[in-house]
Image (tube, helix red, strand yellow):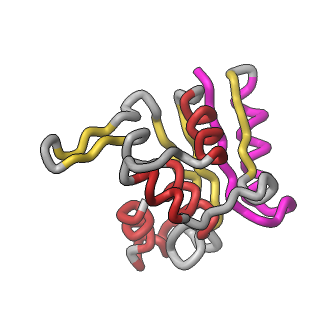
Amino acid sequence: MHTLLVAANPDPSSLTHHVRKELEAALRPVSVEAADLAKERFDPAFTLADRRAYQGSGTYPADIVREHRRLERATDLVLIFPVYWWSMPALLKGWIDRVFVNGWAFEHSPASGLRPKLQALTTHLLPIAGGDSGAYERHGYEEALRTQI
């Protein structure tokens, strides 16, 4: 077992990072790796190179290959993020957009349709929110998060 904790918050003193550190400590001695997308300066912008790789007519950018290798070591992925406008921060959304791509996370073609490739990876969401669960349920925010992510 190897767990990859991915945190997406620019403030290193945030509750997001506090939760990540506590979870990392609680999971030990199991193999755990922490990724701080802001500290690592991950670029969430989906570029033309990303698009070409997605379409199968180019290679994955080096930073994406690094993320693929990190995820290939993981059996569990935990996304830890603050809730921004009932969703995840752009930094995390960009990470997902750029990393979970055609040819690596799944294969898609008109002939064969969609074929997922990451069935061995279990994903856990740990959104950090300013409201209680009752408010999220009443206003449909929980459903919005689940639908989007």
**The one of 141 and 103 positioned closer to us in this rendering:** 103
Question: How many numbered discs, if any?
Answer: 0
The percent position of residue 142, horizontal first and vertical second, equals 43, 66
User: Which residue in the rendered view is the most extreme toward the front?
Assistant: 57
The percent position of residue 138, horizontal first and vertical second, equals 40, 76
Q: Quadrant of residue 111?
A: top left
Is 88 drawn above or below residue 101 in the view shown? below
In magenta, the rendered stretch is 1-28
Q: Is residue 119 left or right of residue 18?
A: left
**The one of 61 and 102 positioned closer to us in this rendering:** 61
Is 110 drawn above or below residue 145 in the view shown? above
Q: Is residue 145 left or right of residue 80?
A: left
Which corner quadrant holds the C terminus?
bottom left
Is 55 drawn above or below residue 66 in the view shown? below
Is 122 drawn above or below residue 63 in the view shown? above
Q: Residue at x 38, y 41 (%)?
A: 103
**The one of 69 and 140 positioned closer to us in this rendering:** 69
Q: Residue at x 66, y 42 (%)?
A: 5
The percent position of residue 20, horizontal first and vertical second, equals 73, 47
The percent position of residue 104, horizontal first and vertical second, equals 43, 39
Q: Residue at x 35, y 42 (%)?
A: 106
Q: Is residue 111 magenta?
A: no
Q: Quadrant of residue 146?
A: bottom left
User: Which residue in the rendered view is the most extreme toward the right?
Assistant: 13
Q: Is residue 134 left or right of residue 80?
A: left
Q: Is residue 35 left or right of residue 48?
A: right
Q: Residue at x 66, y 47 (%)?
A: 63
Which corner quadrant holds the N terminus?
top right
Q: Is residue 13 magenta?
A: yes
Q: Quadrant of residue 65?
A: top right
**The one of 100 and 5 positioned closer to us in this rendering:** 100
